[in-house]
Image (cartoon, rainbow, N blue to C red):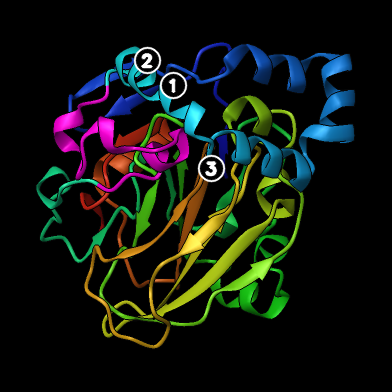
């Protein structure tokens, strides 16, 4: 049985690209800790923050022309490299346009590996979903039927592999297909919009399977049907799909993007179809997230 319950006083992860263990700069950390850790904050969480109307209101604020003034200070504070952007910072008409910006193709090369990470983020990999007893905090178990909203489908994938990819507000917020294949229509599973930061998940892991989320089936030639999910979260204005269902797509092709806010994607594989990358397994076994960019190796 595997457990995952990191200390959330500071969020540390291993960066594949630098080879270093790093500490996350948490956007809005003070507010997060108050809402999810203070009794008064929890009252506001259930009365307002988790509701779609709050995230829609905040998303509209981030889409006004005035919000564009936030772009340059954000880039400087979080050390982003504008040389990676497809368009210069001065071109963004709002903070939200900057948030779901596109990158130059050379900024995110696609590896030769058959299965690649679908997004920039901090990743956890589990080779056998049925062996996950708890993570983020002891005593919270992973509920695959609730996540998928389909007990029969969950039974098929119960002993498969799962990768949770957590995107922070500072990350590139477009997500991509992890393998070549043909995608289905996307199904939306409605729900509230709690945060999916470790600070929040340490309080209640079930936010992953109660939040609004989307599910797409990707039919592949060599790796079965891969399930791809996007998880909504507080201040994520919406989940946008940009692909065409039923049209074969190359590995690394864009699938969609999140509007303002941090969120997560989940990739689920049928049993026995893939082997997760060694550094993903190694760090996850040590209760440490692995930071890796979209297009780098996730599995073979």
Residue 68 at x, y = what percent? 42, 28
Q: Which residue is mark 3?
A: 263
Q: Residue at x 22, y 53 (%)?
A: 295
Residue 11 at x, y = what percent? 48, 19
Describe residue 167's horizontal placement relative to residue 56 as left or right. Answer: left
Report which quarter residue 282 is drawn in. top left
Q: In front: 136, or 182?
A: 182
Q: Secondary structure at mark 1?
A: helix
**Is 211 placed above or below 172 here?**
below
**Is 171 placed above or below 127 here?**
above
- Identify the residue at the far front of this view: 65
Q: Residues within 10 Å of mark 1 (few under 14, many from 20)?
A: few
**Callouts 2 and 1 close, C-beta under 8 Å:** yes
Q: Earlier in the sequence, mark 3 or mark 2?
A: 2
Q: Earlier in the sequence, mark 1 or mark 3?
A: 1
Q: In front: 134, or 210?
A: 210
**Callouts 1 and 3 close, C-beta under 8 Å:** no
Residue 300 in view: no
Q: Give the distance between the C-alpha atoms of the residues marked 2 and 1, in whole angstroms.
A: 6 Å
Q: Quadrant of the N terminus?
A: top right
Q: Nearer the viewer, mark 3 or mark 2?
A: 2
Q: Residue at x 53, y 36 (%)?
A: 64
Numbered range of the magenta stretch: 80-102
Q: Residue at x 77, y 44 (%)?
A: 53
Q: Residue at x 33, y 20 (%)?
A: 72
Q: In front: 105, or 70?
A: 70
Q: Give the distance between the C-alpha atoms of the residues marked 3 and 2, in whole angstroms.
A: 22 Å
Q: Which mark is residue 70?
A: 1
Q: Which mark is residue 108?
A: none
């Amino acid at each position: 049985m595997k457990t995952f319950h990191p200390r959330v006083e500071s969020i540390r992860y291993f960066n594949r690209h630098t080879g270093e263990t790093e500490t996350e700069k948490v956007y809005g950390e003070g507010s997060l800790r108050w809402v999810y850790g203070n009794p008064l904050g929890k009252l506001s969480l259930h009365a307002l923050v988790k509701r779609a109307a709050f995230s829609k209101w905040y998303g509209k604020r981030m889409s006004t022309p005035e919000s564009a003034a936030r772009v340059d200070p954000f880039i400087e504070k979080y050390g982003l490299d504008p040389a990676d952007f497809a368009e210069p910072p001065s071109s963004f008409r709002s903070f939200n346009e900057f948030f779901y910006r596109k990158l130059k193709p050379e900024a995110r090369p696609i590896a030769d590996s058959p299965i690649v990470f679908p997004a920039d983020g901090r990743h956890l990999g589990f080779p056998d979903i049925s062996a996950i007893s708890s993570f983020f905090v002891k005593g919270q178990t992973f509920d695959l039927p609730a996540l998928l909203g389909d007990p029969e489908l969950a039974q098929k994938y119960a002993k498969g592999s799962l990768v949770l990819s957590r995107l922070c507000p500072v990350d590139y917020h477009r997500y991509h297909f992890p393998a070549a294949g043909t995608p289905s229509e996307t199904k939306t599973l409605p729900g509230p919009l709690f945060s999916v930061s470790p600070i929040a998940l340490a309080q209640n892991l079930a936010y992953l399977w109660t939040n609004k989320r989307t599910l797409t089936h990707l039919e592949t030639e060599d790796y079965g049907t891969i399930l791809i999910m996007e998880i909504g979260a507080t201040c994520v204005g919406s989940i946008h799909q940009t692909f065409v269902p039923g049209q074969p797509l190359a590995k690394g092709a864009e699938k969609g993007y999140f509007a303002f806010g941090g969120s997560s994607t989940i990739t689920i594989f049928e049993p026995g179809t893939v082997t997760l990358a060694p550094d993903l397994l190694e760090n996850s076994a040590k209760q440490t997230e692995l930071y890796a960019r979209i297009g780098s190796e996730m599995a073979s």
